[in-house]
Structure formats: C-alpha cells, structure tokens
Image (spheres, coloured by chain):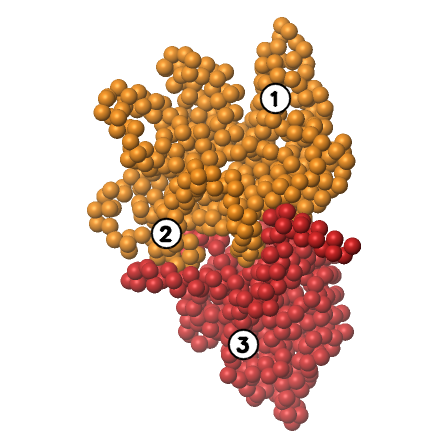
Chain colours: A red, B orange
C-alpha cells in the first residue's frame, strides 16, 4: 500500500512538470536556507537612509551615549537646526546625531557632561521606537536615559497601512525577532501571508539581502566595462528624474543643517497634509501604537533605562484639526501609560512657552523654537531626581544641581 | 486585484482547486462568482456596472435578432448604448476639457463642470466584447441562451481587465465541455503564468524606470538618451502587455480554457501592416471586423480605402485613452499604414527594386526601419501630452547633429549608476532585440512544441527563484489597465 502510494506520488511528480518544478523549488529553498545563500549582515542596507546612518553611527560610537533621544521629525529637525545655529557651522545631517544645545545647557545646570545620541527619525512611530529600544539600546550600548518626544500623529496617523510600512521598520526589523508582536505589526491577512511566505521560502524571505548582493556584484561588473571618466549623477540629480526611486534615501555631504536656515524660511502651511492624516481616525492604529509605546517603556524599564516622555509642542492650528475624542485619548494615554511604567512625563503639548514664531510649520519647531525646546528639556531633566539618578550623578551633585536649579528660578 | 499581487496568489489557487472539485454544472456559476469577486475587489460599486451592461446586452440583442424590419436600427441602439456608457466613463472629462480649450482659443471663457469619474477597470475591453457579440448576432450567428454563460464571457477574470478581447463563438463552447482535470492544464498554465510574471516584473518594471526618467524630464537627457528611452519603452510596453496576456492565458489554461494570443514577435515585423498583424492581435482583428470592414474596408476606391484605414486607426488610438496624444498616435498609425501601401505600390512598379525587396538584406533593413517607425509612434503613446510628444520628437530629431561630435560621456544614462538598469541599457536593448530573432528561429525549428522535459522544469524552477527574489514590494500597474 505504502509502496503503491509512493509510486503514485512519484508518477504525479514525473507526470507533471509543474509539480516537479514545485518540488525542485522547495528542495532548492531548503538548500539555500542551509547554506544561507546571499545572507548579509543586518547593517548591510541596500541604500543609505536616515535610519541606516543613525544605526551605523550608533553602533560605531566610540563611547556609550548616556542619553538617547527618540521621536519623529518633530524632534529630529529642530535638533540639527538649533545645533547649526549654536556652532555657526553647516552640519552634515548624516553625521550629526546629537543635541549640542541640550548637552551644553545640561552641563551648565548640573555640571555633568553628557553624551547624547539622537535616534529621532522622520516618520518614526512608537512601533519604530520600540524596535530601536529592543534591538539596539542594550548591552554595552544601553543608555541611562531615553527622552522620547511624541506628537499626536505618532498615534493617529491614518495613512499608515500597518507598523511595518515605515522606513525605520524596514531596517530595524533586520536586527532581531519581532514575532511576539506579529499580530500588531502584520495585522492584515496579506501582510501576514507575506511574512509567512518569507519564512517558508528562503529566497523570498531573504530577497532584500540577495537583491543587494546581486546588485553590488552587477555594479562592480558594470563599472569595469563603463568608462571611468564619466561624472555620475548625485542623489539630487537622480531624485529629480526618478523622484519615487529609493524613498528616504540620503547620502553623505548632501543634506545639511545650515545656521539661520529656518529663521530665513517663511511659515509653511501644512495643515492640508495633517487634515488628511487625521481625517479618518483609525483606532486600530491608535491601539496598536499605544501598545508599542507601553512595551517600549517596559523594555526600557527592564533594562534599567529611565524614560522621559515629552508631549511635543505643536501649534493650536494643528491641534484644532484633531477631533476632541482623539485629542483626549492621546493625552490621557500618554499620562496614564508613563505613570504606570514609572517614566517621567513632560507635557508641552499646549505649552504657552512656544509661540507661532517658534514654528516652521504647524508642527515642526524652527531653530529658535528648537533651542528653546532643548533648553527647556535640559532644565526639566536637571530637576528630575530619577533622571539624575539614572545618569549616575552622585547624590551630592544631585542636591547641588537641584539647589542651583532652584536658585536660577528665583 | 493585480495579477502580480499576493491577493492573486491566494485567489487563483483557491478558485483552481474549487473548480476542479466542483461538478461540471456548477463550474460556470463558480467562475462567475469568482470573476465578480475579482472585479469588485477594486471598487465594489463597479460590479453593478458590468452586471448592468451584461444584462442590458443579454436582453437587447435577442430583441434585435427577432426584429425583421428594424434590425439595423436595433443594432445601432445596442452599439450606441454600449458606446455611450463607455463615453461617459472614459471620454466625458476629455470631451469637456477639449471643448473648454477650443472655446478658450476663440476667446470664450467657459467654465466646464468638474466630473470626478473614476474609469472602471477593463470597461474598454468588455464593451468591445459586447459590441462584437451584437454584431455577430446581427450577422446571423447564434445567440447565447444562458445568462450565466454570457455573463461569464464578459467577466471571465483572466481576461476581464485587459483582454485579450475574446470571441464568444470561441469561448462559450468551451464552457460546455465536460472537461476532466489534466496535468497539461497545470503545466501549460504555470509555464505561461511564470513567463508572464517574469516579463512584467523583471523586464517591464525595470525598463519603466528609464522610461519614466526620460519622458518626465526630457530636458535632462540628450537626443541619443531619448532614443534609448524610446527603445526601452517599446520593450517595456511589449513585455508589460505580453506579460499580462501570458498570465491571463495561463490562468485560463488552469481551468482548461484557451483564450487567443495577442502578440507574435511584433518587433520582427517587416512593415507596419505586418506589425499590426503581430501587435495586440485581438484588438487589431476587432477593429478590422467591426470598424474597418463596416466602413467599407479595402473593397472600394483607393481614397475611400485610405479614409477607412485612417478612421479605424485614429479611433483605435482614441480607444487606448482619452488624450490628444493617443489620438495623435492613432492618426500616426493611420498615416504610416497609408504611406506603406503607397510605398509598396511604388516598389512593385520598379523592376530592380521589386527584386531587391525580395532579398534577405532588404527584409532585415525593413525590420529595422519598421521598428523605428513604430518607436516614433510610441513617443506619442507614452508622452503625457501631445505637446510633450512633439518636444521629445524634436529633440530626438537632433540625433544626427549630436552624432557628429559623439562621445560616451554625452549619454546621461551612463551617469546614473543606480538603478543599474540605466548603464545596463546598452547591453539589454540589443539583447532584447536579438531575443526576438532567436525566439523566431526557435519557433521555426518547432522547439516550443517539444522542449526537453528537464529544460521545462529547469526554466520553471529558475523563474520561481528569480521571481521570489526580485518581486518588488509594490509593482506598477499593468499599462493596459488604464484602457
């Protein structure tokens, strides 16, 4: 009976070229998987983006950073611009990953030197912040404090299909296993199918690596044939003719923060963009991102990292676009979760300290607003015992820092 | 639902398995439901459109067939009803804009109403199938008695969105065959689907990057670059549409159905008439049978024949899209077809030229010349507007001047090293042209009738691997979806 069955299976395979091909393909997938054909290191990105520069720089830091900033462009943009104003130098955005304004002010207030690193990325969601914390802020690279600046969009982005759609996710997901959050990261049937196919079929799951390896090999081959004296297009020229190719790509020496840059630019009305983003509130996105937010705080707490959550200042113009229930849910969630996880919370959402002139558009601070923001954060942190303790500031120094802070208030 | 999507990867095997375990009498309803699910997965409301058109045609055509004295009138009504629906969805905005522009030219400022109409996928294809059905019944061919079968003829998911345009006499009888599953269906179907996907994903989508760059920013490229971009578009549109057709034919084959071929190595055509016998065959034969011949075809005076040819091709151009550049493309095709007829008459009138025209050298020179004539036409087709097409053609016409002081450094495409398709173009384009010749030679040798078993399996495995690796996260839609 068994012999007959195996014979009939063999006959089917031989009878059908398609079945034979499926069987051969399955075998090939197993062999490729065993040999790890084309598999590259996690940091071997196909092309450089904001995320890849940050990851590369963080992993190559000569000394551990004590304080890491997380957040979206709300944190990322004013940080670089304020530092350019401070140093009076143009700063290459692919190299500058710290807040000099914050470090300087914190030192002034506490006498403690601090090494900051910014993992704030354009479009970063709490799901990305979770992956950064879980996969990268650990072991020898564990910071003492995380300052996480959040805005309503981070939780209420209705244009986001799922957490795996962001550029940071694409790269960060290479650094570890995220399967425990799979139902949140791949909530749809098709995205889940895509993930499972990747696990089942080695070439499909490793396609990015194999593509990168193949492209590098082809590029080398082509460059041996092509004349070497031809001046090649830079990214700006290429982006002009192929705007949708390699989204978020940024190269060395091609993106700069210039002193007084944002002071020179007029206020940009981006309300239509945000009206669209908030138009159809997706509570699934809110719940899923809130869960990542809470889990990120949990992971940090488990590793002894103190987190300071900052509700970023945004303009009234932007805040008014939010439905009242969304606004309430956002702020209530921040307050509740941070308290529950023992994190500090600084609410600057509707802070009167920031005026319209501090903003470059309805949500992003310009350099002067950035300077005000990072000074303010330094002041708040210098008065936070939990932060000072996490930074391993000696008790005497803490007392002195707090006293100095009180003096400066008086 | 796109053929090159994960949704289709789930949908097709599901329907395939259900089909072959379902009793024969339930297979048509099953495919009908599947086809509507396929169509409505994009915009559910448009399911009503295709259903309404199907029902309308199914009820009106028998009425026309029964009519004795007013048969022609009824045919006109059926055709007009179909064309009005097509016109509203496809050409209303274009017509209003054209009227607005026309009035603007004579100084009248007319504010045209804004119509936010989304073109239903495949409408041009299934409307042409309905018109074909009405015309054939008018000519005395039998009607389809079963509504589910008629509905499936129009909505059959493999050919629903971009053809090939089926003939009901070929398709409906296949529904009556009590077919049993054969491994050949799976083998042939899978081979076609894999080949089609490879054409789309590996070739068309990569060439699209070059074309996009060149046609969106012609000012950034030299004449030689624009010629290369145009060659790239010639192959992009071929592999895109031929790839779609292969997947459609392969998907139909999985259920044991045969749908007509649409392409036969079009770029080895030795003249423009030959090209139209090889390119989008189901459309060109439709235009011949239901437009060119009813207009009088070639059985009339020379000038009337030319008029018929011109009208057929111009309307054929407009069928591709509501845009002046599509109309210009159609007009261009009409003009070069007429010019070819005159040229052929002239050659035949001169003795030594007639002899030369029978040589292999002449044949291959004609292939090259035809390819270039077709490519010039593609500029109208691909450009975003008529004005842009003329701008690009104007720059391409400067090639001889550019060649006087030509060096490789003048080629902008060599300056773009990423994506790699740009510098690779100088190798890929000749290879694609040669592949046409090689495939033609293999066809002559009947290689494809009986290729060795291991080669077929090996090719399928190789394609599965390559497609797994190079399948993009999001692939552009098939070009012919917009029509």
Identify the chain of the residue marked 1, using the numbered disc in the image: B
Quadrant where the image shows the C terminus of chain A: bottom right
CB atoms of marks 2 and 1 within 8 Å = no
Residue A240 at what x, y percent from top left?
Answer: 42, 53
Identify the chain of the residue marked 2, using the numbered disc in the image: B
- The residue carrying pointer 2 sits among few (fewer than 14), some (14 to 19) or many (20 or more) residues within 10 Å by Cα, namely few
Between circles 3 and 1, the one closer to the viewer is 1
Q: Nearer the viewer, residue A71 or B146?
A: B146
Compared with B102, A294 (above or below) is: below
The answer to which image quadrant residue A353 occupies is: bottom right
Q: Mark 3 points at which residue?
A: A58
Q: Mark 1 points at which residue?
A: B133
Quadrant where the image shows the N terminus of chain A: bottom right
Q: Of marks 2 and 1, which one's residue comes earlier in the chain? A: 1
Q: Mark 2 points at which residue?
A: B427
Residue A173 at what x, y percent from top left?
Answer: 61, 67
Secondary structure beneath label 1? helix
Secondary structure beneath label 3? helix
Measure the C-alpha gap from mark 3 to mark 1. Answer: 68 Å
Residue occupying image coordinates x 39% and y 48%: B431
Residue occupying image coordinates x 65% and y 62%: A199
Measure the C-alpha gap from mark 3 to mark 2. Answer: 41 Å
Q: Which of A187 and A325 is in front in this view?
A: A187
- Whether discs 3 and 2 lie on one chain: the answer is no
CB atoms of marks 3 and 2 within 8 Å = no
Residue B330 at what x, y percent from top left?
Answer: 43, 29
């Amino acid at each position: 009976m068994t012999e007959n069955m195996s014979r009939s299976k063999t006959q089917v395979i031989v009878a059908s070229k398609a079945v034979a091909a499926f069987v051969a393909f399955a075998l090939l997938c197993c062999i490729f998987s065993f040999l790890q054909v084309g598999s590259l290191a996690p940091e071997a990105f196909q092309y450089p983006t904001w995320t890849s520069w940050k990851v590369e720089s963080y992993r190559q830091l000569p000394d551990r950073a004590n304080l890491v900033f997380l957040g979206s462009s709300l944190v990322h943009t004013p940080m670089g611009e304020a530092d350019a104003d401070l140093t009076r130098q143009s700063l290459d955005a692919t190299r500058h990953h710290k807040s000099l304004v914050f470090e300087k002010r914190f030192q002034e207030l506490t006498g403690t030197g601090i090494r900051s690193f910014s993992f704030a990325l354009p479009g970063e969601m709490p799901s990305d912040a979770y992956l950064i914390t879980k996969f990268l802020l650990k072991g020898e690279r564990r910071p003492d404090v995380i300052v996480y600046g959040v805005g309503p969009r981070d939780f209420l982005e209705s244009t986001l299909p799922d957490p795996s759609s962001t550029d940071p996710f694409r790269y960060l997901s290479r650094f570890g296993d995220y399967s425990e959050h799979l139902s949140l990261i791949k909530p749809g049937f098709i995205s889940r199918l895509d993930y499972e196919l990747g696990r089942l079929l080695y070439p499909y799951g490793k396609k990015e690596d194999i593509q990168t390896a193949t492209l590098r090999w082809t590029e080398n081959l082509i460059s041996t044939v092509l004349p070497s004296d031809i001046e090649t297009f830079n990214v700006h020229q290429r982006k002009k003719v192929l705007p949708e190719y390699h989204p978020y790509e940024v190269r060395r020496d091609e993106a700069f923060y210039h002193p007084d840059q944002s002071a020179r630019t007029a206020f940009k009305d981006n309300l239509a963009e945000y009206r669209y983003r908030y138009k159809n509130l997706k509570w699934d996105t809110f719940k899923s991102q809130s869960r990542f937010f809470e889990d990120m705080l949990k992971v940090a707490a488990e590793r002894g990292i103190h987190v300071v959550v900052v509700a970023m200042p945004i303009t009234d113009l932007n805040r008014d676009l939010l439905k009242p229930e969304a606004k309430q849910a956002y702020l209530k969630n921040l307050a509740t979760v941070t308290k529950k996880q023992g994190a500090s919370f600084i609410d600057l959402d509707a802070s009167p300290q920031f005026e319209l002139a501090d903003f470059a558009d309805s949500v992003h601070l310009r350099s002067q607003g950035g300077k005000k923001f990072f000074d303010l954060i330094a002041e708040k942190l210098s008065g936070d015992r939990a932060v000072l303790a996490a930074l391993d500031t000696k008790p005497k120094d803490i007392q002195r820092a707090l006293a100095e802070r009180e003096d400066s208030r008086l | 639902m796109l053929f090159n999507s994960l949704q289709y990867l789930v949908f097709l095997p599901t329907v395939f398995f259900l089909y072959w375990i379902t009793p024969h009498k339930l297979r048509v309803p099953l495919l009908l439901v599947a086809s509507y699910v396929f169509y409505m997965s994009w915009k559910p409301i448009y399911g009503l459109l295709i259903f309404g058109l199907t029902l309308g045609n199914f009820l009106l055509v028998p009425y026309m067939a029964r009519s004795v004295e007013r048969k022609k009138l009824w045919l006109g009504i059926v055709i007009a009803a179909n064309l009005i629906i097509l016109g509203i969805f496809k050409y209303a905005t274009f017509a209003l804009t054209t009227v607005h522009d026309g009035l603007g030219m004579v100084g009248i400022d007319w504010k045209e109403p804004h119509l936010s109409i989304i073109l239903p996928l495949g409408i041009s294809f299934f409307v042409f199938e309905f018109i074909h059905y009405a015309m054939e019944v008018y000519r005395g061919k039998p009607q389809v008695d079963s509504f589910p079968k008629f509905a499936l003829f129009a909505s059959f998911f493999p050919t629903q969105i971009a053809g090939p345009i089926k003939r009901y006499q070929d398709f409906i009888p296949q529904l009556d065959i009590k077919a049993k599953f054969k491994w050949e269906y799976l083998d042939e179907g899978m081979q076609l689907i894999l080949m089609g996907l490879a054409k789309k994903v590996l070739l068309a989508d990569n060439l699209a990057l070059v074309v996009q760059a060149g046609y969106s920013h012609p000012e950034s490229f030299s004449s030689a670059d624009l010629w290369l971009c145009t060659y790239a578009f010639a192959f992009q549109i071929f592999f895109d549409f031929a790839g779609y057709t292969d997947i459609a034919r392969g998907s139909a084959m999985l259920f044991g159905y045969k749908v007509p071929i649409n392409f036969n190595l079009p770029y080895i055509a030795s003249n423009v008439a030959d090209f139209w016998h090889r390119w989008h065959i189901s459309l060109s034969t439709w235009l011949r049978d239901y437009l060119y011949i009813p207009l009088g075809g070639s059985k009339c005076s020379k000038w009337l024949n030319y008029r018929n040819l011109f009208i057929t091709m111009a309307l054929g151009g407009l069928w591709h899209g509501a845009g002046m550049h599509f109309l210009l493309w159609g007009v261009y095709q009409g003009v070069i077809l007429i010019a070819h007829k005159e040229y052929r008459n002239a050659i035949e009138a001169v003795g030594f030229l007639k002899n030369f025209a029978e040589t292999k050298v002449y044949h291959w020179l004609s292939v090259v010349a035809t390819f270039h004539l077709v490519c010039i036409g593609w500029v109208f087709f691909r450009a975003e507007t008529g004005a842009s097409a003329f701008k690009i053609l104007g720059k391409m016409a400067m090639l001889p001047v550019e060649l006087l002081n030509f060096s490789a450094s003048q080629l902008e495409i060599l300056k773009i090293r990423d994506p790699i398709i740009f510098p690779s173009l100088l190798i890929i384009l000749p290879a694609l042209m040669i592949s046409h010749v090689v495939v033609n030679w293999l066809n002559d040798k009947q290689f494809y009738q009986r290729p060795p078993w291991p080669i077929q399996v090996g090719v399928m495995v190789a394609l599965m691997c390559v497609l797994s690796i190079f399948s993009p996260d999001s692939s552009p839609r098939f070009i012919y979806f917009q029509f």
